[in-house]
Image (cartoon, rainbow, N blue to C red):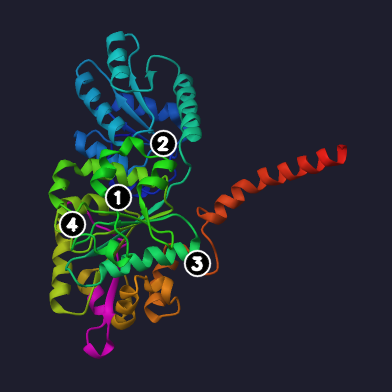
Amino acid sequence: MMADGKDDSAGHADAAGQTPGNYFLFNSMQVEPRQWLADALGSLGRLVVEGGPQAAFLEQVGAVNPGMVFLHFTRDRAEASSRLAEQVARLYPGLPLVAVGDAGEPEIMLAALRAGARDFVDMRASPAGAIEIVRRLLAVRGQAEPARRGKVVAVLGARVGVGSTTLATNLAAAVRRRSHGDVLLMDLGLPVRDGSLYMNISPGFHFVEGVRNLRRFDQVFVQTALARHGNGVVVLPLPATLAELRDISFMEALGLLNRLRAFFDLQVVDLGGFSNVEFMAHLVKAADMVVMVVDQSVGAIVSAAELLQELKKREVERDDLHLLVSRFDARLGVDAQQIAQRLEAPSVGTLPDRREPLVLALNRGAVLADDSPADPYVRAVGQLVDRLGYRAGTASETGLLGRVKEKLPEALRAMRALRAERAGN
Protein backbone atom coordinates (compact mmCIF):
# COMPACT_ATOMS: atom_id res chain seq x y z
CA MET A 1 0.00 0.00 0.00
CA MET A 2 1.07 3.56 -0.58
CA ALA A 3 1.23 6.45 1.85
CA ASP A 4 -2.30 7.49 0.95
CA GLY A 5 -3.58 4.10 2.10
CA LYS A 6 -4.54 2.86 -1.35
CA ASP A 7 -3.58 -0.61 -2.56
CA ASP A 8 -0.42 -0.40 -4.64
CA SER A 9 0.47 -3.89 -5.76
CA ALA A 10 1.79 -2.50 -9.05
CA GLY A 11 3.98 -0.11 -7.11
CA HIS A 12 5.57 -3.04 -5.33
CA ALA A 13 6.39 -4.73 -8.62
CA ASP A 14 7.82 -1.52 -10.03
CA ALA A 15 9.98 -1.13 -6.97
CA ALA A 16 11.72 -4.47 -7.39
CA GLY A 17 15.20 -4.13 -8.80
CA GLN A 18 15.56 -0.41 -8.09
CA THR A 19 18.62 1.20 -6.55
CA PRO A 20 18.58 1.20 -2.73
CA GLY A 21 17.70 4.67 -1.50
CA ASN A 22 15.05 5.31 -4.16
CA TYR A 23 12.50 3.48 -2.01
CA PHE A 24 11.67 3.48 1.68
CA LEU A 25 9.46 0.82 3.27
CA PHE A 26 7.18 1.70 6.20
CA ASN A 27 5.24 -0.68 8.44
CA SER A 28 2.20 1.10 9.82
CA MET A 29 -1.54 0.47 9.99
CA GLN A 30 -2.47 4.13 10.54
CA VAL A 31 -3.06 6.77 7.89
CA GLU A 32 -1.67 9.77 9.83
CA PRO A 33 1.92 8.51 10.31
CA ARG A 34 1.99 7.29 6.70
CA GLN A 35 1.11 10.73 5.39
CA TRP A 36 3.43 12.53 7.83
CA LEU A 37 6.43 10.40 6.86
CA ALA A 38 5.68 10.64 3.14
CA ASP A 39 5.53 14.44 3.40
CA ALA A 40 8.68 14.55 5.54
CA LEU A 41 10.75 12.45 3.13
CA GLY A 42 9.61 14.52 0.16
CA SER A 43 11.97 14.13 -2.78
CA LEU A 44 14.41 11.82 -0.98
CA GLY A 45 12.58 8.78 -2.33
CA ARG A 46 9.29 6.97 -2.72
CA LEU A 47 7.58 5.65 0.40
CA VAL A 48 6.00 2.19 0.10
CA VAL A 49 3.70 1.22 2.97
CA GLU A 50 2.92 -2.34 4.03
CA GLY A 51 0.56 -2.70 6.96
CA GLY A 52 -0.11 -6.42 6.64
CA PRO A 53 1.21 -9.38 8.65
CA GLN A 54 4.87 -9.71 9.56
CA ALA A 55 5.55 -12.28 6.83
CA ALA A 56 4.10 -9.96 4.17
CA PHE A 57 6.29 -7.08 5.32
CA LEU A 58 9.46 -9.21 5.35
CA GLU A 59 8.67 -10.39 1.83
CA GLN A 60 8.27 -6.78 0.71
CA VAL A 61 11.74 -5.96 2.05
CA GLY A 62 13.19 -8.48 -0.38
CA ALA A 63 10.97 -7.36 -3.27
CA VAL A 64 11.29 -3.59 -2.88
CA ASN A 65 14.97 -3.51 -1.83
CA PRO A 66 14.48 -0.31 0.17
CA GLY A 67 17.29 1.99 1.18
CA MET A 68 15.76 2.13 4.64
CA VAL A 69 12.99 0.50 6.67
CA PHE A 70 10.69 2.44 9.01
CA LEU A 71 8.62 0.78 11.74
CA HIS A 72 5.78 2.50 13.60
CA PHE A 73 6.17 2.15 17.38
CA THR A 74 3.15 2.88 19.60
CA ARG A 75 2.08 1.61 22.99
CA ASP A 76 -0.24 -1.01 21.54
CA ARG A 77 2.19 -2.00 18.72
CA ALA A 78 5.51 -1.87 20.58
CA GLU A 79 5.81 -5.62 21.11
CA ALA A 80 4.83 -6.55 17.55
CA SER A 81 7.09 -3.86 16.07
CA SER A 82 9.98 -5.05 18.25
CA ARG A 83 9.61 -8.61 16.95
CA LEU A 84 9.49 -7.32 13.39
CA ALA A 85 12.58 -5.16 13.97
CA GLU A 86 14.53 -8.17 15.24
CA GLN A 87 13.49 -10.18 12.17
CA VAL A 88 14.50 -7.43 9.73
CA ALA A 89 17.86 -6.98 11.47
CA ARG A 90 18.53 -10.74 11.33
CA LEU A 91 17.42 -11.31 7.73
CA TYR A 92 18.77 -8.08 6.21
CA PRO A 93 21.93 -7.12 8.11
CA GLY A 94 23.22 -3.74 7.06
CA LEU A 95 19.77 -2.40 6.13
CA PRO A 96 19.11 0.78 8.18
CA LEU A 97 16.14 0.39 10.49
CA VAL A 98 14.42 3.50 11.89
CA ALA A 99 11.56 3.73 14.40
CA VAL A 100 8.76 6.28 13.99
CA GLY A 101 6.68 7.43 16.93
CA ASP A 102 6.22 9.90 19.78
CA ALA A 103 9.46 10.86 21.56
CA GLY A 104 7.30 11.92 24.51
CA GLU A 105 6.99 8.22 25.36
CA PRO A 106 10.56 7.31 26.43
CA GLU A 107 9.69 3.66 27.10
CA ILE A 108 8.59 3.29 23.46
CA MET A 109 11.84 4.86 22.24
CA LEU A 110 13.83 2.50 24.47
CA ALA A 111 11.93 -0.55 23.17
CA ALA A 112 12.65 0.48 19.58
CA LEU A 113 16.37 0.99 20.17
CA ARG A 114 16.66 -2.31 22.05
CA ALA A 115 14.98 -4.08 19.12
CA GLY A 116 17.67 -2.85 16.73
CA ALA A 117 16.44 0.54 15.44
CA ARG A 118 19.35 2.78 14.43
CA ASP A 119 17.44 5.97 15.26
CA PHE A 120 14.03 7.35 16.21
CA VAL A 121 11.95 9.81 14.15
CA ASP A 122 9.77 11.97 16.38
CA MET A 123 6.48 12.77 14.65
CA ARG A 124 5.97 15.74 16.99
CA ALA A 125 9.18 17.38 15.78
CA SER A 126 10.06 19.14 12.54
CA PRO A 127 10.26 16.99 9.38
CA ALA A 128 13.81 18.34 8.99
CA GLY A 129 14.84 15.93 11.75
CA ALA A 130 13.63 12.94 9.72
CA ILE A 131 15.48 14.19 6.63
CA GLU A 132 18.72 14.57 8.60
CA ILE A 133 18.43 11.03 10.00
CA VAL A 134 17.74 9.50 6.58
CA ARG A 135 20.62 11.29 4.87
CA ARG A 136 23.05 10.37 7.63
CA LEU A 137 22.15 6.68 7.73
CA LEU A 138 22.16 6.35 3.95
CA ALA A 139 25.61 7.94 3.83
CA VAL A 140 26.89 5.53 6.49
CA ARG A 141 25.41 2.57 4.62
CA GLY A 142 26.96 3.76 1.36
CA GLN A 143 30.40 3.76 2.97
CA ALA A 144 29.99 0.34 4.60
CA GLU A 145 28.11 -1.62 1.93
CA PRO A 146 29.10 -2.48 -1.64
CA ALA A 147 27.19 -0.23 -4.05
CA ARG A 148 26.35 -3.12 -6.38
CA ARG A 149 22.74 -4.18 -6.92
CA GLY A 150 22.99 -7.35 -8.96
CA LYS A 151 20.22 -8.96 -10.98
CA VAL A 152 18.54 -12.29 -10.23
CA VAL A 153 17.32 -14.62 -12.99
CA ALA A 154 15.12 -17.55 -11.98
CA VAL A 155 15.24 -20.55 -14.34
CA LEU A 156 12.20 -22.82 -14.00
CA GLY A 157 11.63 -26.30 -15.32
CA ALA A 158 8.42 -28.06 -14.31
CA ARG A 159 9.89 -31.47 -15.06
CA VAL A 160 13.27 -33.04 -14.52
CA GLY A 161 15.08 -33.49 -17.81
CA VAL A 162 13.75 -30.56 -19.87
CA GLY A 163 17.14 -28.84 -19.85
CA SER A 164 16.81 -26.10 -17.23
CA THR A 165 20.09 -26.96 -15.46
CA THR A 166 21.93 -27.11 -18.79
CA LEU A 167 20.57 -23.68 -19.61
CA ALA A 168 21.40 -22.25 -16.17
CA THR A 169 25.05 -23.40 -16.28
CA ASN A 170 25.59 -22.17 -19.83
CA LEU A 171 23.81 -18.88 -19.14
CA ALA A 172 26.01 -18.21 -16.12
CA ALA A 173 29.16 -19.04 -18.11
CA ALA A 174 28.05 -16.98 -21.12
CA VAL A 175 27.32 -13.87 -19.02
CA ARG A 176 30.62 -14.26 -17.21
CA ARG A 177 32.46 -14.64 -20.51
CA ARG A 178 30.79 -11.61 -22.10
CA SER A 179 30.69 -9.18 -19.17
CA HIS A 180 33.66 -10.27 -16.99
CA GLY A 181 31.36 -9.52 -14.06
CA ASP A 182 30.82 -11.57 -10.91
CA VAL A 183 28.29 -14.32 -11.60
CA LEU A 184 26.76 -16.81 -9.17
CA LEU A 185 25.05 -20.06 -10.16
CA MET A 186 22.61 -20.92 -7.38
CA ASP A 187 22.31 -24.66 -7.94
CA LEU A 188 18.87 -25.36 -6.42
CA GLY A 189 17.49 -27.69 -9.08
CA LEU A 190 16.79 -31.39 -8.83
CA PRO A 191 18.44 -33.87 -8.98
CA VAL A 192 20.54 -32.33 -6.22
CA ARG A 193 23.79 -30.66 -7.32
CA ASP A 194 23.49 -31.45 -11.00
CA GLY A 195 24.59 -27.89 -11.77
CA SER A 196 27.74 -28.39 -9.73
CA LEU A 197 28.33 -31.65 -11.57
CA TYR A 198 27.94 -29.92 -14.94
CA MET A 199 30.45 -27.31 -13.78
CA ASN A 200 32.79 -30.12 -12.70
CA ILE A 201 33.23 -28.85 -9.15
CA SER A 202 32.27 -30.19 -5.73
CA PRO A 203 31.35 -27.27 -3.44
CA GLY A 204 31.60 -27.74 0.29
CA PHE A 205 29.70 -24.63 1.34
CA HIS A 206 25.98 -24.85 0.51
CA PHE A 207 22.78 -22.81 0.45
CA VAL A 208 21.60 -23.59 3.99
CA GLU A 209 25.05 -22.76 5.37
CA GLY A 210 24.79 -19.47 3.50
CA VAL A 211 21.55 -18.67 5.34
CA ARG A 212 23.11 -19.63 8.67
CA ASN A 213 26.12 -17.40 8.02
CA LEU A 214 24.21 -14.44 6.59
CA ARG A 215 25.83 -11.91 8.92
CA ARG A 216 29.33 -13.06 7.97
CA PHE A 217 29.00 -12.22 4.29
CA ASP A 218 31.54 -9.70 3.10
CA GLN A 219 33.90 -9.67 0.11
CA VAL A 220 36.53 -11.79 1.87
CA PHE A 221 33.97 -14.37 2.96
CA VAL A 222 32.56 -14.59 -0.58
CA GLN A 223 36.04 -15.11 -2.02
CA THR A 224 37.07 -17.79 0.47
CA ALA A 225 33.91 -19.75 1.39
CA LEU A 226 32.18 -20.17 -1.98
CA ALA A 227 33.39 -22.59 -4.68
CA ARG A 228 34.44 -21.11 -8.01
CA HIS A 229 34.72 -22.73 -11.45
CA GLY A 230 37.80 -22.10 -13.57
CA ASN A 231 35.74 -19.75 -15.77
CA GLY A 232 35.08 -17.53 -12.75
CA VAL A 233 31.46 -18.53 -12.06
CA VAL A 234 30.75 -19.07 -8.35
CA VAL A 235 28.49 -22.01 -7.45
CA LEU A 236 26.24 -22.32 -4.39
CA PRO A 237 24.37 -25.66 -4.31
CA LEU A 238 21.68 -27.25 -2.19
CA PRO A 239 22.88 -29.32 0.77
CA ALA A 240 23.47 -32.97 -0.10
CA THR A 241 20.74 -33.83 2.41
CA LEU A 242 17.56 -31.98 1.46
CA ALA A 243 16.15 -32.41 4.98
CA GLU A 244 18.40 -29.51 6.02
CA LEU A 245 16.11 -27.15 4.10
CA ARG A 246 13.56 -27.61 6.87
CA ASP A 247 15.87 -25.66 9.18
CA ILE A 248 15.40 -22.39 7.27
CA SER A 249 12.39 -20.24 6.43
CA PHE A 250 11.33 -18.70 3.14
CA MET A 251 12.19 -15.27 4.50
CA GLU A 252 15.69 -16.40 5.46
CA ALA A 253 16.21 -17.70 1.92
CA LEU A 254 15.10 -14.33 0.52
CA GLY A 255 17.45 -12.60 2.92
CA LEU A 256 20.38 -14.55 1.47
CA LEU A 257 19.27 -13.81 -2.10
CA ASN A 258 19.08 -10.11 -1.32
CA ARG A 259 22.40 -10.09 0.51
CA LEU A 260 24.19 -11.75 -2.41
CA ARG A 261 23.00 -8.98 -4.76
CA ALA A 262 25.72 -6.81 -3.22
CA PHE A 263 28.49 -9.20 -4.29
CA PHE A 264 27.34 -10.54 -7.67
CA ASP A 265 26.32 -8.73 -10.83
CA LEU A 266 24.08 -11.68 -11.69
CA GLN A 267 22.61 -14.63 -9.82
CA VAL A 268 21.30 -17.45 -12.00
CA VAL A 269 18.95 -19.47 -9.81
CA ASP A 270 18.29 -22.95 -11.19
CA LEU A 271 14.91 -24.18 -9.90
CA GLY A 272 14.44 -26.94 -12.48
CA GLY A 273 12.48 -29.85 -11.02
CA PHE A 274 12.25 -28.16 -7.61
CA SER A 275 9.22 -29.61 -5.85
CA ASN A 276 8.53 -27.09 -3.07
CA VAL A 277 6.21 -24.62 -4.83
CA GLU A 278 5.94 -22.32 -1.79
CA PHE A 279 9.71 -21.92 -1.66
CA MET A 280 9.88 -21.45 -5.42
CA ALA A 281 7.11 -18.83 -5.38
CA HIS A 282 9.03 -16.59 -2.98
CA LEU A 283 12.20 -16.76 -5.07
CA VAL A 284 10.35 -16.18 -8.36
CA LYS A 285 8.57 -13.16 -6.92
CA ALA A 286 11.91 -11.61 -5.93
CA ALA A 287 13.65 -12.31 -9.27
CA ASP A 288 14.29 -9.62 -11.87
CA MET A 289 13.67 -12.02 -14.75
CA VAL A 290 12.00 -15.43 -14.99
CA VAL A 291 12.72 -18.03 -17.67
CA MET A 292 10.60 -21.17 -18.08
CA VAL A 293 12.25 -24.08 -19.91
CA VAL A 294 10.00 -26.63 -21.61
CA ASP A 295 10.43 -29.13 -24.42
CA GLN A 296 7.94 -30.05 -27.13
CA SER A 297 6.43 -33.06 -25.34
CA VAL A 298 2.83 -32.93 -24.15
CA GLY A 299 3.87 -33.97 -20.65
CA ALA A 300 6.35 -31.11 -20.30
CA ILE A 301 3.86 -28.54 -21.61
CA VAL A 302 1.12 -29.72 -19.25
CA SER A 303 3.52 -29.75 -16.28
CA ALA A 304 4.64 -26.21 -17.11
CA ALA A 305 1.01 -25.04 -17.26
CA GLU A 306 0.28 -26.67 -13.90
CA LEU A 307 3.34 -25.05 -12.32
CA LEU A 308 2.34 -21.61 -13.56
CA GLN A 309 -1.16 -22.17 -12.22
CA GLU A 310 0.24 -23.11 -8.80
CA LEU A 311 2.32 -19.94 -8.79
CA LYS A 312 -0.74 -17.86 -9.68
CA LYS A 313 -2.57 -19.37 -6.69
CA ARG A 314 0.24 -17.90 -4.59
CA GLU A 315 -0.17 -14.47 -6.21
CA VAL A 316 2.89 -14.87 -8.41
CA GLU A 317 2.12 -13.68 -11.93
CA ARG A 318 5.01 -12.50 -14.08
CA ASP A 319 4.09 -10.43 -17.11
CA ASP A 320 7.73 -10.66 -18.18
CA LEU A 321 7.91 -14.49 -18.23
CA HIS A 322 10.20 -15.63 -21.05
CA LEU A 323 9.66 -19.12 -22.43
CA LEU A 324 12.48 -21.19 -23.89
CA VAL A 325 11.66 -24.36 -25.83
CA SER A 326 14.61 -26.70 -25.46
CA ARG A 327 15.78 -29.34 -27.94
CA PHE A 328 13.57 -27.65 -30.48
CA ASP A 329 12.91 -29.57 -33.69
CA ALA A 330 10.56 -28.03 -36.27
CA ARG A 331 9.84 -31.50 -37.68
CA LEU A 332 7.87 -32.39 -34.52
CA GLY A 333 5.07 -30.09 -35.64
CA VAL A 334 4.74 -28.28 -32.31
CA ASP A 335 5.43 -24.60 -32.92
CA ALA A 336 7.14 -22.53 -30.19
CA GLN A 337 4.52 -19.78 -30.55
CA GLN A 338 1.76 -22.33 -29.97
CA ILE A 339 3.40 -23.44 -26.73
CA ALA A 340 3.80 -19.80 -25.66
CA GLN A 341 0.11 -19.16 -26.28
CA ARG A 342 -0.83 -22.25 -24.28
CA LEU A 343 1.28 -21.04 -21.35
CA GLU A 344 0.36 -17.36 -21.82
CA ALA A 345 4.03 -16.42 -22.08
CA PRO A 346 4.57 -12.97 -23.65
CA SER A 347 7.91 -13.92 -25.23
CA VAL A 348 9.44 -17.15 -26.46
CA GLY A 349 12.72 -18.44 -27.84
CA THR A 350 14.13 -21.81 -28.83
CA LEU A 351 17.21 -23.84 -27.98
CA PRO A 352 18.40 -26.27 -30.67
CA ASP A 353 18.88 -29.97 -29.97
CA ARG A 354 22.65 -30.16 -29.37
CA ARG A 355 22.82 -33.18 -27.11
CA GLU A 356 26.06 -34.54 -28.58
CA PRO A 357 28.26 -31.43 -28.11
CA LEU A 358 26.69 -30.74 -24.70
CA VAL A 359 27.48 -34.28 -23.48
CA LEU A 360 30.97 -34.22 -24.99
CA ALA A 361 31.74 -30.95 -23.17
CA LEU A 362 30.30 -32.32 -19.95
CA ASN A 363 32.42 -35.47 -20.19
CA ARG A 364 35.51 -33.29 -20.55
CA GLY A 365 34.52 -31.35 -17.43
CA ALA A 366 33.76 -28.22 -19.48
CA VAL A 367 30.78 -25.95 -20.08
CA LEU A 368 29.80 -25.67 -23.75
CA ALA A 369 29.57 -21.86 -23.51
CA ASP A 370 33.30 -21.85 -22.63
CA ASP A 371 34.31 -24.80 -24.79
CA SER A 372 32.59 -23.82 -28.04
CA PRO A 373 31.21 -20.24 -28.06
CA ALA A 374 30.19 -20.54 -31.74
CA ASP A 375 27.98 -23.61 -31.17
CA PRO A 376 24.32 -23.04 -32.19
CA TYR A 377 23.17 -23.79 -28.62
CA VAL A 378 25.52 -21.18 -27.17
CA ARG A 379 24.44 -18.64 -29.79
CA ALA A 380 20.81 -19.23 -28.77
CA VAL A 381 21.76 -18.71 -25.11
CA GLY A 382 23.46 -15.51 -26.26
CA GLN A 383 20.06 -14.10 -27.22
CA LEU A 384 18.98 -14.52 -23.60
CA VAL A 385 22.20 -12.82 -22.49
CA ASP A 386 21.20 -9.92 -24.78
CA ARG A 387 17.82 -9.71 -23.06
CA LEU A 388 19.63 -9.31 -19.75
CA GLY A 389 21.42 -6.27 -21.12
CA TYR A 390 24.85 -7.79 -21.78
CA ARG A 391 25.20 -6.89 -25.43
CA ALA A 392 27.86 -8.60 -27.54
CA GLY A 393 31.11 -6.67 -27.66
CA THR A 394 30.43 -4.77 -24.45
CA ALA A 395 31.22 -5.41 -20.82
CA SER A 396 28.74 -4.76 -18.04
CA GLU A 397 29.20 -1.43 -16.31
CA THR A 398 28.76 -3.34 -13.05
CA GLY A 399 31.40 -5.86 -14.00
CA LEU A 400 35.14 -5.53 -14.54
CA LEU A 401 34.87 -2.58 -16.93
CA GLY A 402 32.66 -0.70 -14.50
CA ARG A 403 35.10 -1.23 -11.66
CA VAL A 404 38.01 -0.12 -13.85
CA LYS A 405 36.12 3.06 -14.72
CA GLU A 406 35.44 3.72 -11.06
CA LYS A 407 39.15 3.50 -10.25
CA LEU A 408 40.38 5.40 -13.32
CA PRO A 409 40.13 8.96 -11.90
CA GLU A 410 41.95 7.86 -8.76
CA ALA A 411 44.70 6.21 -10.83
CA LEU A 412 45.11 9.31 -13.01
CA ARG A 413 45.45 11.53 -9.96
CA ALA A 414 48.11 9.21 -8.55
CA MET A 415 50.04 9.29 -11.85
CA ARG A 416 49.92 13.10 -11.97
CA ALA A 417 51.13 13.33 -8.38
CA LEU A 418 54.01 10.96 -9.14
CA ARG A 419 55.02 12.98 -12.21
CA ALA A 420 54.88 16.20 -10.19
CA GLU A 421 57.02 14.66 -7.48
CA ARG A 422 59.61 13.47 -10.01
CA ALA A 423 59.63 16.88 -11.72
CA GLY A 424 60.27 18.56 -8.38
CA ASN A 425 63.25 16.32 -7.74
Measure how far apart labels 4 and 2 are at the Cα level: 28 Å
Residue drawn at x 31%, y 38% is 214
Magenta residues?
314-340
Question: What residue type is disc 3 on?
Answer: Arg
Choose top left, top right, bottom left or bottom right for residue 297: bottom left
Q: Earlier in the sequence, mark 2 or mark 3?
A: 2
> Element type at marker 1?
helix
Residue 311: assigned label: 4
Q: Are marks 3 and 4 in contact (CB under 8 Å)?
A: no
Which quadrant is the C terminus positioned in?
A: top right
Question: What residue type is disc 1 on?
Answer: Ala
Q: Which residue is mark 2?
A: 67
Of badges 3 and 4, the one in the foreground is: 3
Residue drawn at x 59%, y 52% is 404
> Element type at marker 3?
loop
Q: Earlier in the sequence, mark 1 or mark 3?
A: 1
Measure how far apart labels 2 and 1 are at the Cα level: 16 Å
Work out which residue is located at the far bottom of the displayed protein and give it.
331
Q: Residues within 10 Å of mark 3 (few under 14, many from 20)?
A: some
Q: Position of residue 10 (x, y in %)?
A: 31, 49
> Element type at marker 2?
loop
Measure how far apart labels 1 and 4 are at the Cα level: 13 Å
Q: Are marks 1 and 4 in contact (CB under 8 Å)?
A: no
Q: Position of residue 363 (x, y in %)?
A: 30, 75
Q: Residues within 10 Å of mark 2 (few under 14, many from 20)?
A: many
Q: Which residue is mark 1?
A: 286
Q: Earlier in the sequence, mark 1 or mark 4?
A: 1
Q: Height in image: 111 above or below 246?
A: above
Q: Which residue is mark 3?
A: 391
